[in-house]
Amino acid sequence: MVKNILYCEDNPKTASRVSRAIRAAFIMQNPNIILAESLAKAMQSTAQKSLDLVITDGNLLGRDNGWDLADELRARGYTGPIIYAGGRKTDIPEGRERVFNDLLQKPFYEQKDVDPLIEAVRKYI
């Protein structure tokens, strides 16, 4: 069964690099990675899809952020895992880290930087 992964990242190079790494690591599962750079795009892109995993940056396009995305998804009934993969864990407002199942820190410049994210994804798909 194909897994739907929502990946919210406003940097196109990072989004591409991480998406490729996830597809390569899970080639047999052939995950469907839905890319979004903002809260609105994420909600629009996933309105008719069942999600298996969400990965989000902290700061998204405009004034959007990953913790608001997590709150919105939870309010809409999503109960699955959400991985925070942002610039700094300290960017998350105090007390808001509890909406995430895993907290990871960017950058994702090289494969060795992406490996912790791949291991986190492995727990959920």
Image: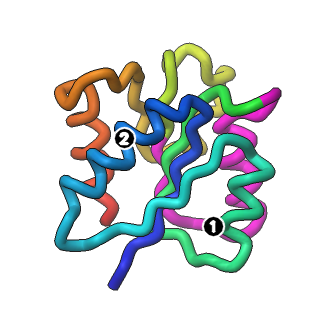
Q: What SS does tag 2 mark?
A: helix
Q: Is residue 76 magenta?
A: yes
> Measuring 33% from the left and 61% from the top, which residue is drawn there?
124
The spot of residue 50 in percent (x, y) is 57, 77
Which is nearer the N-term, disc 2 or disc 1? 2
- Would residue 89 appear left or right of 120 to someone viewing this image? right
Query: In the image, what residue type sits under mark 2?
Result: Val
x, y percentage for residue 37? 65, 41
Q: Amino acid at mark 1?
A: Tyr
> Which residue is located at x 74 percent, y 53 percent?
41
Quadrant of the rendered image containing residue 97: top right
Quadrant for the C terminus in the image: bottom left
CA separation in Å, label 2 and label 1: 23 Å
Instruction: Determine crowd level at label 2: few under 14, some 14-19, many 20+ residues with C-alpha closer than 10 A.
Output: many
* Residue name at image x 18 percent, y 27 percent: 112
Residue at the image position 50 percent from the left and 37 percent from the top: 84
Residue furthest out toward the bottom: 1
Question: Which one is in front, 71 or 118?
Answer: 118
Left/right of residue 36 with respect to residue 125 in the rendered view: right
Vertical arrangement, residue 51 with respect to residue 14, above or below: below
User: In screen coordinates, is 31 left or right of 95?
Assistant: left
Question: Residue 18 — which label?
Answer: 2
Mark 2 vs mark 1, foreground winner is 2
What are the residue bounds of the magenta stretch? 62-83
Quadrant for the N terminus in the image: bottom left
Instruction: Say what secondary structure mark 1 lies in.
Output: loop
Q: Circle 1 is placed at which residue position?
A: 78
Residue 82 spot, x, y in % from top left: 51, 51
Using the image, determine if residue 5 lies above or below residue 18.
below
Instruction: Please determine whether, in this image, residue 58 is positioned above or below residue 101.
Output: above
Residue 77: in magenta span: yes
Horizontal and vertical percent position of residue 30 = 29, 71
